[in-house]
Image: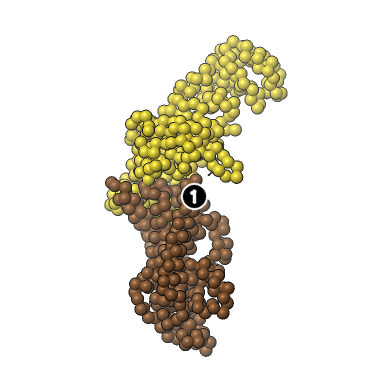
Chain colours: A yellow, B brown
Amino acid sequence: MPNSAEDIVSIRGLTKRYDGKVPVEAVRNIDLTVRRGELFGLLGPNGAGKSTTISVCTTRTPPTSGTVWIAGLNVVEAPAQARKHMGVVPQYNTLDRQCTVWENLYFHCRYFGYSSATATKRANELLEMFRLTERSKSFVRELSGGLAQRVQIARAIAHQPEILFLDEPSAGLDPQSRLALWDSIRQLLAGGITIVLTTHYMEEADELCNRVAIIDHGKILVCDTPANLKSSVGAQKVISLHLRSVSDSAFERSLGELAGVKGVEPTKEGVRIFVDNLDGLLPRIIEVTGPRLKDISISETTLETVFIKLTGRDLRE
Amino acid sequence: MSDSILYARAFWGLMVRDISVLRREFIAFMVRTVMNPLMFVFVFTYLFPKMGQDFQNARGISFGTLILPGLVAVAIFVQGIMGVALPLSFEIGSTREIEDRVMSPLPVSLVAIEKIVFSSLQSVVAALVVFPMIYFIPATPVHVHVNSWTVLIGNVLLASLASGAVGLTIGTIVKPQHIALMFGVVVVPVTFFGCVYYPWAALHSVRWLQIAVLINPLVYMSEGLRIALTPEAPHMPVWATLAALLLCVGLLGYTGVRGFLNRVLS
Ligand SMILES: Nc1ncnc2c1ncn2[C@@H]1O[C@H](COP(=O)(O)OP(=O)(O)OP(=O)(O)O)[C@@H](O)[C@H]1O
Ligand SMILES: [Mg+2]
């Protein structure tokens, strides 16, 4: 059983293997806990197992082993009951193409047992809340990506679930729609709902989430607040050197010996240097590198840095 | 709310959605239901007799009488394909919009069963629409005689459920990109070898075919309606059609629900 009533999601030892021609172990023995009222982020690259984890939590994928509880209900033993407590926005548009925006909301309420009158009232309320009233009679194919996303979120919370799962909510949105999405996410959170979202945009995880779990190859690498994750890297800035020739260990050692350097790592294009501050360091780095230096760039530590530190890879690779 | 009330309400919600979509597309529904029997009856039982080319059965039963039950059966059968298999194939395999209904608070198998029930409803409506048409158009008299309403209603209901089960099974098996092929490979042979245009007994002269067509559910739908509507035409025994249709509903219903679960829960 889940540890406490505070935990709305409890995942214990979850493994999911897809038995296809090539069996894939999409999720490998993960444990996660999400507390009521928090915004929890699952951050990971393509194919990391984010959607699979969400699918199991939302009763759509049977786990190979392990257990998931949502609001104290085991999703394998009581899937229909568990679904009452959750709303889901999948990675792709699953709006009912045969129905208008208003009908999508209305029928969803009917599926959850609302009477015709209550469903009508709730659908109108949601249109208002998500500024969709003008589009209430539009059919799904007439909606832009950002609007469809909004309708999907409105529909997912229509039956007033305690927890909302958003799978890559900002994928494919233009920057303006993304900001609007972040706004509505914050509003929902203020209304008391718990949100679990997946993303491969580190800015999104950093900006929005109370806690973030970094997932790669089906495993949770770390799970903490964005601030703690970033400070765990032990450096404030990252200097990336673009070299004309491949880096070698002697060169990396001489960089590492410079005062203020916390760590050096080879990359595809050259090396990456972790430092606390830049005080006078740049001229010395340039001196050590010499003529093979092609380009140099400096960035703050981000969740991306954390991911690189943990896996040696870029999130976007 | 107790679980069974919750399930019943969710089930009803799914029905309300399907019925309201059908209401909006009622003209399309009518066209796809009415066109085939209308053309058929007009050409073979109106035009042909007028042209002096009437088919008469040896026992003096008019062709109109012979095909009336068959055409009603086809109208029932086609709903399973057009009303369930076709949309379901896309909703599962292409747009994935079935997912919101799968996320309703009821066992997923009931989402599949709702499709069968809704399809049956369309089949019954189709039967009611098609029947008067093929009764009144033919130029030669059509003899309809209902001996037992129980047998008629039982056959129509079982045939409707069986066609819904066929539709569910096909909709979960056939990928959207192969739907057009399915019409040629499944629908056409099933209707031509479904004892629609001839009674099953007449096939005795081609014995192997008479036995082979027994795997075709449409045979029992046509024969069942023959018993119920035109008992003077040769037909199978009542128990045979009812038992076979019951078996179809059970077997195909089970296969369809299993197929549905496999597709939507992976
Ligand atoms: N239905 C399936 N059958 C077989 N393999 C699958 C299935 N769904 C996912 N996979 C595989 O499982 C792994 C994890 O996939 P998943 O969709 O969970 O990743 P993700 O983190 O959501 O990635 P993305 O950012 O691409 O959405 C991938 O290797 C994927 O190919
Ligand atoms: Mg995904």
Q: Nearer the viewer, residue A147 or B137?
A: B137
As drawn, A43 above or below A297: below
Q: Secondary structure at mark 1?
A: helix
Q: Mark 1: few, some, or many residues within 10 Å (few <14, many ≥20)?
A: few
Residue A251, percent from left and from top: 68, 16
Say if residue B151 shows up in the picture.
yes
In-front residue for pair A5/A258: A5
At 37% from the left and 73% from the top, the residue drawn is: B152
Q: As drawn, is A293 to the left or to the right of B111?
A: right
Q: Quadrant of residue A310?
A: top right
Q: Please state which amino acid type lies under the numbered disc 1.
A: Asn
Q: Which residue is mark 1?
A: B262
Q: Please say if A236 is above or below B17.
A: above
The x, y position of residue B117, in whole percent, is 39, 60
- Taking the spot 57% from the left edge, 64% from the top edge, the residue there is B185
Residue in the image at 54% along x and 32% along y: A216
